[in-house]
Amino acid sequence: MSTKRRKTSHENGAVKEASVQPPKTKPTPQTVPQPSEPSPTPGSEAESETMDNTSGEGNGDAAPKSFQDLGIVDSLCDACDALGYKKPTPIQQESIPLALQDRDIIGIAETGSGKTAAFALPILQALLEKPQPLFALVLAPTRELAAQIAQAFEALGSLISLRCALILGGLDMVQQAIALGKKPHVVVATPGRLLDHLEKTKGFSLRNLRYLVMDEADRLLDMDFGPILEKILKFLPRERRTFLFSATMSSKVESLQRASLRDPLKVSISSSKYQTVSTLVQNYIFIPHKHKDTYLIYLCNEFAGQTIIIFTRTVLETQRVAILLRTLGMGAIPLHGGLSQSARLGALNKFRAGSREILVATDVAARGLDIPNVDCVINFDLPQDSKTYVHRVGRTARAGKSGHAISIVTQYDLEIWLRTEAALGVQLDEYALEKDEVMVFKPRVEEAQRHAKNEMKMLMDDRGKKGSVLKGGKGRKRGPPGSSRDNMDAEEG
Amino acid sequence: MEVDSDEDDEEEGAQSAQPYMSLMRSLVESAPRNAKRRKLDHTSAEGQDSAKPEAAAEGTDDEDDGEERDVDLVEEPEEDPADAAPEDLFDEDDDLDSSDPFEVHFSDPKEDELQPRLKAIHGSKWRLERVAAKSTRVFLNTPDTGDAAGKPLPAPVSGISDLKLKKRLQEVMEPKHPKFDQVEQTIAPLLFNYQDMLYCNRTVAGSQGIRRMASLHALNHIFKTRDRVVKNNARLSRSDGNEDLELRDQGFTRPKVLMLLPTRQSCVRMVDMIVSICEPDQQENRKRFEDGYIDKQARFSDDKPDDFKDLFSGSDDDMFRLGMKFTRKTIKYFSQFYNSDIIFASPLGLRMAIGSEEEKKLDFDFLSSIELVIVDQADALLMQNWEHVEFIFEHLNIQPKDAHGCDFSRVRSWYLDDQAKYFRQTAIFSAFNTPELAELLRAHCHNWAGKARLQQEAAGTIQYLPVKARQTFSRFEAASIAADPDARFAYFTRAIVPLLTRHKARDAAGTLIFIPSYLDFVRVRNYFANNAAVEHVSFGTISEYADVPEASRARSHFANGRHKVLLYTERAHHFRRYQIKGVKRVVLYGLPDNPLFYQEIAGGYLQKSEQALLVEHGQGAVRVMFSKYDVMKLERIVGTARVGKMIHDQGDTFDFV
C-alpha cells in the first residue's frame, strides 16, 4: 500500500502548476461568479436555490475550453484523453472550476451530459494533492447507477493507482467489508448497504471523509431514502465538501437542509427546470386506449433495426409487453424489479451488447443508466410525473447523439400529458401516422395478445417457485423494516 | 461381510482413475456394519453433556451405547476480539527486531523479495535443491524467481539461545533445555524460519523433541502475535482515533495455530508439552480436560511393539477437537474456537466441527487465519480417513463468510488480498514419506518462504529380519498408477496363485497373504471365494472391519491348519498387531507403508514358526509383488542403495537369501 501512496504523491508537482490555489475553508466571494450568501441558514439556502442558471447562461457561449483550461492536472487530462473525452461538456465546464475552488455545488444538468466526470475529476485532483484513504463517498440511488459510477472512477483513476470500492445491497457483506478494510480512496455506494457497513463493520469509518457526492440527488433526498441518508450524514464529518448532482432538482428547502450543504453554488446549464436535450425529438400519439398494443407494434415496426426502450408502469405489464413483442418475432427483453439482481444485470447486458433490440422496462431503467446508442424511447404508459418523464427520455439522445421519444397518450392520460407538457414548457407535436396502416397489424396483434395472456397466466402460477421468472409469492412481501433497507436500492417498481 | 459375486464384475468394469470407487460404494451400501457412524449434529446431546462431562469420559467404546456424547462440546459466546486487556501482555519489553523471522515472514515482509516469489508460486514455478545436511537429506523447494543464487538453508540452531524467542519463553526454556538434541537441531532451523517442512523420519524416541519444537514455535508465534495486538489496541485507545494510525497486525479470526493429531492421547502429550513450556499460573477447565482425554488403563500386553503402544496407549479415540486460549497467566481449555489461539483436533473431529455439506451449515471461518499447521504422526493419520485431512487443507485460509466481529482496518493486507495461504506455515511429521504426504505438500503448501522435505537415507529392513528367510521380490509392469490395481491382480492370479494350487493345494498350507489396501483385499477375497482355480484352497480373512471374535476364529483356524490361506490387511495389522501363528510362507500382495510391518510380518511370523518347529531353519519364504509405483515403500524396505536397480533393472525378480 505504501508504494501506491508514494506513486500518487509524485503527481503533486503538477498540481502546483495548475495554479488553482483554493482557499481552504471559507469561500472568498470575489472568485465566485455570482453572489452568495455566506450565512448557512435555511433561508439563504433557499435563496441560493432561486439564483438559478446565471452561471450557465453567462458562460454558455464562451470559447470551448480544454480540460487543462479548467485547471485539471496533466495526469488526469491524460486519463480523459485515454477515455476519449475530448472537450469538457457544459456541466463540466461550469462545475469543475467551482469545485476546484473548494465550494459545495448543486449541479443540474440534463442526463447524459457528463455529470459523473464533472464531480469525479475535481475529487481525483484533490486526492492527488493530498492522498488519503477513504477520501470521497459517492452515493447513488440504484445499484446499476452506482456500478456505473464506480466504473467511471476506476477508468479515470487507472493512471493514478486509484482504489475504489463498490458497496451495493444484495451482495456479500464480508467481501465488501474486506474491500473497505483495504482503505480505498473512493467509496461508491447505495445508501442502505453503506449504512449497514457504517453501523456494523468494525474498523470502517468515514470520519476523515473529505468529499460527499450525491448523484440523482433528488431521488436520494426524497422520502424513501431520506431517513437513511440522515443517519449516514451523522457518520460523516461536518468539515467536508458536498456535491449534489441531478437532472432534476427538488426545490424543497428541507431536502437541502438534509444534505447539509454549506453555502452552495448552483450550476445549471439550461433554463428549464425540466431539461431535455436539444438533439432529442419528442412526439406523442393520441389514440384510443383499446388500440394501445396495436399502435405500439406499429411503432416498433417503424423503428425496426434500431434500439428501443419501452417504458411501462408495472412489472406485469412489462412482462406482458415483452411476451407480446417476442410472439410477433421482435427481440424484446424485460427489465423490472420482479427479476433477481443477476437477471436484471443479464437483461441489461444483453441489451447493451445488442443481442436484443428492444428493452421493455419499468422505471427501474429510467434513471442514470448509460446505455449508448438508444435510438428511441417509447412511453407505453405515461409517467406519473414530469420529472420521471425527463429521466425516461434522457435514456436516448445521450452525449450529443440524436434520439426520438414518443409517448402514447390515450383518452385517460390526457391530464397527465398536459401537465407534463406544461412542466417542459413546450407544446410537442403529434407523431404523424396513417391509421389504416396501423390497423393492418390488428389481427396479428390480437392473436399475440391471446398468447401473451396465456403465458402470463403460467408465469403467475409459477411465481415464487424455484427457477421462476418472477420472484416472490403473491402479494409481494417486503419483510420487516430492518431487512427492507438493504433492498431499497433494488428498486422494485 | 457378504459380497455378491456380481460386484466382482462391476469392479472389473471400472476403468476410471479410481478403479475401486464404484466397488467401494457398493460395499458401503451393502455392508450393514461399516465404520462407526458419528453423529454430525452435536446439538442434540448438548444438555446432558455439559451437565456431566465426566460421564462421557468412559465412552471410549462407543459401539454399543447408541447415543454418543460429545465430550468436546463448547457452549460459549464468541468474544469481541477488541476487548483484550492490556494486562494480557506476555512480555513487557518488546523491541522490534528486524531479523526476527516473525517480522520477516508475517509482519513486514520485504516487498521486493515477496512479490517475485508470490508470482513464481502463482505460476507453479518451484526450484528443487538437494542440500546435504547433518544426518539427513534436505530437499528444498523454493519459489523460482529466476535469480541464480538460491536461498541458503537457514543457519543451524544448536540450542535455545540461537532462536528469537519471546523473553518469557526463553527464560523458562533456558534452564530446562538449553541444548537441542539431534532431532531438534534438524527441524528447528526450518521450523523457526517459517518454512514448510515434511519430516519423514519421526521415531518414538524423537517424538518428544518434535513436540517440544512444535509447541515452542507455536507458543512463540502466538505470544508475539498477541502482544502486538494488545499493544496496538493500547496505542489506538490512546490516540483517540484522531491520528490515522495504520496498524495491521492480525487475521480475520483469532485461531492462529492448528494441530492435527491422531488420538486424544497424542493431544494430551502435546498439551502437556505446551504446559511445561509456558508454565501458566492457572489452567481453566483442566479437570474437564483430564476427564475427557486421559485414560490411564493399561490395555496392552508387553508383546506389542513400542510404536504401537506409543500410538494406542491411553485414550485412542480418534474423534476430538479442543480449543485452547492463552492469556498472560492462564491457559483455558475448551475455549470456543473463535476465542482460541490453538485448535487441537483429529482430522475426523475437525471435519465434524466444520459440519456436513448436506445440512448446508458448513462453518470453516475459524480456519481462515491459521498461520501455522502442525501435523504430527501423519503416518497414523494416513491409517485414519485421509480424505478428512485433505478436506481440512482445502478449507484453510479461505476468506470468512461472516465477520465474527473482525476489525477489518486491523487485518494484515495480505489477508485482505486473499494471500493468506502463501504465508501459512505447514509442518508435517511422519515416520515415513508416502505419495499422499508428498501430494499434500505439493498441492496445499504454498509458503512463500519455501518448503523442505527432510528424509534420511533408508538402510532397508531386509537384512535385519530376525530370521533367515528367502525373500523374493517380483516386479510387475503397470502402465499407469490407475492401472496398477488391475495389473497387480492379474500378476497375482498368473504368477502367485499357481504356486498355491499345484499338487491339489498341498503346499498352500500356512500361507499368509498380506494386502495393504482394503479394496484389494475385497477383490482377492472374492476371488478366493468364487474362482474355480482356487476351490481347493481353504482360506480365512482378517481385515480392519473384522470384529475381535471373528479375527480370533480366523487366527485359530489358520494356526491349526483348517484354513490354508489367511488374508490380512495392513490396517488390520496397524490397529491390532496380531501375532499370527502357523505362518510358513508370506506373500505380500503389496508392500506395507510402514517398514516395521515388513519386519514383523515377513520376519517375526516366520521366526515364531521356526521356534514352534513348523518351519525348518531358513526354509521360510517371502514373496513380494511390487511395481514402479511402489518406489517409496520399496526404498524403505530394501534400502536406498538397492531401490534404483530394482525399479529400473531388466530383470524383474530379485532374491535375497
Image (spheres, coloured by chain):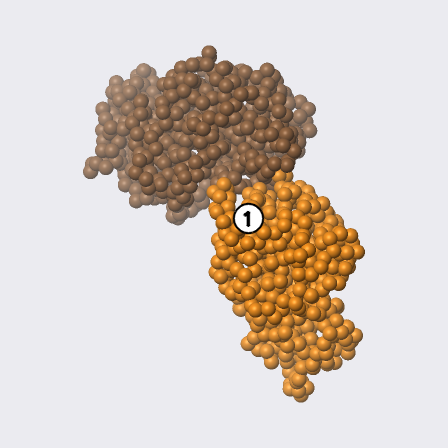
Chain colours: A orange, B brown
Q: For this rendering, which residue is in front, A294 or B478?
A: A294
Q: How many neighbours does mark 1 have within 10 angstroms: few (below 14), some (14-19), or many (20 or more)?
A: some
Residue B579, can we see it? no
**Side (left or right) of A133 relative to A268:** left
Q: Chain of mark 1?
A: A
Vertical relation: B375 (above or below) B169: below
Residue farthest along the top direction in this orientation: B175
Image position, residue A384 (x, y; %): 75, 68
Q: Quick check: B9 left or right of A130?
A: left
Q: Residue at x 56, y 60 (%)?
A: A70
Residue at the extreme front of the image, as rendered:
A30
Quarter of the image for residue A474 reads bottom right
What residue is pinned by disc 1?
Answer: A129
Residue appearing at x 68%, y 55% in the figure = A29
Q: Is residue A401 left or right of residue A273?
A: left
The residue closer to the viewer here, B210 or B166, is B166
- What amino acid type should be assigned to the residue bearing mark 1? Glu
Instruction: Identify the residue shown where x is 31% and y is 25%.
Output: B133
Q: Nearer the viewer, residue A97 or B152?
A: A97
Q: Image quadrant for the C terminus of chain A? A: bottom right
Number of marks: 1
Q: Is residue B121 above or below residue A461?
A: above
